[in-house]
Image (cartoon, helix red, strand yellow):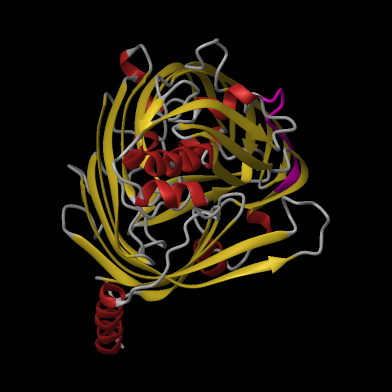
Amino acid sequence: MKYWLGKIIFLLVIHSTYCYSQRDTIKVKKKSSLTNSLIDSTPKKNFLIVGVDIIGNKRTKRSIVLREMTLKEGDTISEANLQKQIEISRNQVFNTALFVDVRIEIVPKFADIISLRIEVKERWYLFPLPYFKLVDRNFNQWWVTENRSTDRINYGVKFTQYNLSGNNDGLDIWLINGYSRQVNLRYNIPFFDKKLQHGLNVGYSYVTQKELNTATSLNKQVFFKNSDFVRTSNRADITYSYRPDQKWRHYFRVSFIHEKLGDTILSITPNYFPENRTEMQFLDFNYSWRFLNVDYNAYPTKGYTLDGYLYKRGLENSTNYWQIGLGGTYMHPITKKSFYKASLAATAKRAYDNCYYNQRLFGYGDFFLRGMEYYVIDGDAAALAKFSIHKQIFKYTLHTGLKSKAYSEIPFRYYLKIFSDLGYAHSDIPGNSTLNNKLLYTGGIGLDIVSIYDFVFRFEFSFNQVGGQGLYLHNR
């Protein structure tokens, strides 16, 4: 099986490298006749932008669109740089996640004077929807390991109002039942100042659950379930954001957290919390930053990102915990319909008490190796590298028949990919873990489906170094 999979991967690499066809990242309008004439004309000119018109923004404030533009009214720009800056501006307006389509045209005024016309199609912003979500780390974990148990599903009502005031702000109210009971309230306003650089995010959540992951054994989670609730959590947080330009983002968050365990947990995992406690309350602090320079945030095909964070939990020794992380991703086109992607990430932590609450590492959130979805690896430091080659093999536009201009057509793009991941997790006390303190590697092939609303669905057939292989499903 691995022999034939290796041959398939090799052929895909060769095919991706030498195929040449038209690339389609975001649906855009073709260059105007003026742009073509500018490119052909000599000598090279500079153009003055005397106006920027925006059409289609029924709710979104004009300032929110202009905030993402690299071209402003009054700018003078060279002919050679004009189309490049239009493309960058279009991508950045689209990446606000406010629109299903963005188009920018050049409108000639005089010989060297132009204006810009921005046409946007707004998304639906109000979503009173039923909530249905698996609580396990991924679909395969629920389907195979947990035998598709309906007890491991959260359900309820999720009320979300995006772009509430037209300033790209959002209000979330979630009422959840099932595996856990949750009440979540959150309001986010990305900009509250005239310069559109400073924002706030405030939230509160209350969660109770009848099942708890109390230990890790042989790189698998061990759960304890009770008829009564075994864990209750209250959390309130406030985040200040600073965005000096289109690419840099800084976040400073302060949270107050109160956690309480059922008494039975102490008999199973006495060191779940520091000092064998059943209750903790503490402040935590987090600073994170990100630099985005990509064409499309949800599924970038060119550009790069850099990010990092510093996290501090607690003000007293018993809750003292530090964690730092750095990461980056680079995408580069191979042909007009194919690209390669490389990601690197590393994290390290230090805690006063090596309780179970502080041990999570690989297998949670986005920090995992493709092909090892069934495993978790605890520890105090880790590094992860992911490599892949993607090729768009098909695109399809669904004609919905709706009268709405924004939803009369829904585009789908299909990418075939090959990938390989490397990882390493260090632990001074690995216990019965078979995956700590050694190089980990996986590989495979997959299909990604990309559509509107930042929808990405991934089918991945992977194999790993411990002899496992299978089809894994992920969605965003």
Q: Is 469 placed left or right of 396 in the picture? A: left
- Please check the rendered image and state whether residue 160 is part of the magenta-colored stretch, yes or no: yes
Residue 267 placement (x, y as % from top left): 47, 39
Q: Please name whichever residue, 14 or 279, is drawn nearer the observer in this view of the structure.
A: 14
Q: Please name whichever residue, 338 or 446, is drawn nearer the observer in this view of the structure.
A: 338
Q: Please name whichever residue, 113 or 99, is drawn nearer the observer in this view of the structure.
A: 113
Q: Quadrant of residue 127?
A: top right
Q: Quadrant of residue 355?
A: top left
Residue at left offset 21%, top offset 44%: 429
Q: Please name whichever residue, 454 or 262, is drawn nearer the observer in this view of the structure.
A: 454
Outermost residue, right side: 403
Residue 391 placement (x, y as % from top left): 38, 69
Residue at left offset 24%, top offset 70%: 465
Residue at left offset 50%, top offset 57%: 138
Residue 449 placement (x, y as % from top left): 53, 65
Q: Quadrant of residue 22?
A: bottom left
Q: Is residue 56 visible?
A: yes
Q: Which residues are magenta?
A: 155-166
Q: How would you classify the magenta stretch by its main secondary structure?
A: strand
Residue at left offset 56%, top offset 26%: 51
- Above or below, comparing residue 401 to residue 223 in the picture: below
- Please check the rendered image and state whether residue 89 is part of the magenta-colored stretch, yes or no: no
Residue 147 placement (x, y as % from top left): 58, 68
